[in-house]
Amino acid sequence: MWQLAAVMAVFNLAGGTLGARTALKQGSGFVRVVLLTVVFALVAKLAYEQWLA
């Protein structure tokens, strides 16, 4: 399944580059907000799966 791995590697590289450029351009405040948003979304998802699903 090396074709799938190659596609995943290309998109991983593109996402990392885009994320690094955005973080450098927007600054640490933006990174903090995005990180907290992702963490709270993950906690909400896990809580939903644990107690309601």
Image (spheres, helix red, strand yellow):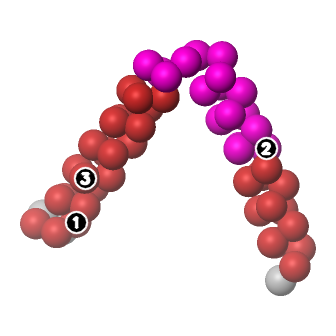
Task: State which quarter of the image contains the N terminus.
Answer: bottom right
Note whether 11 is above or below 17 in the view shown.
below
Which numbered marker is on residue 14? 2
Which residue in the protein does label 3 denote?
43
For marks 1 and 2, give the one nearer the viewer. Answer: 2
User: Does label 1 or label 2 sit earlier along the sequence?
Assistant: 2
| Tag 2: amino acid | Ala
Range shown magenta:
14-30
Task: Determine which quarter of the picture holds residue 40.
Answer: top left
Q: Few, some or many C-alpha atoms within 10 Å of disc 3 (few <14, some 14-19, many ≥20)?
A: few
Q: Few, some or many C-alpha atoms within 10 Å of disc 1 (few <14, some 14-19, many ≥20)?
A: few
Q: CA distance from mark 2 to mark 3?
A: 27 Å
Describe residue 10's horizontal placement relative to residue 46 as left or right: right
Note whether 35 is above or below 39 in the view shown.
above
Verify CB contact (< 8 Å) between mark 1 and mark 2: no
User: Does label 3 or label 1 sit earlier along the sequence?
Assistant: 3
Note whether 6 is above or below 35 in the view shown.
below
State the image coordinates of residue 6 (x, y, percent, origin top left).
87, 67
Q: Secondary structure at mark 3?
A: helix
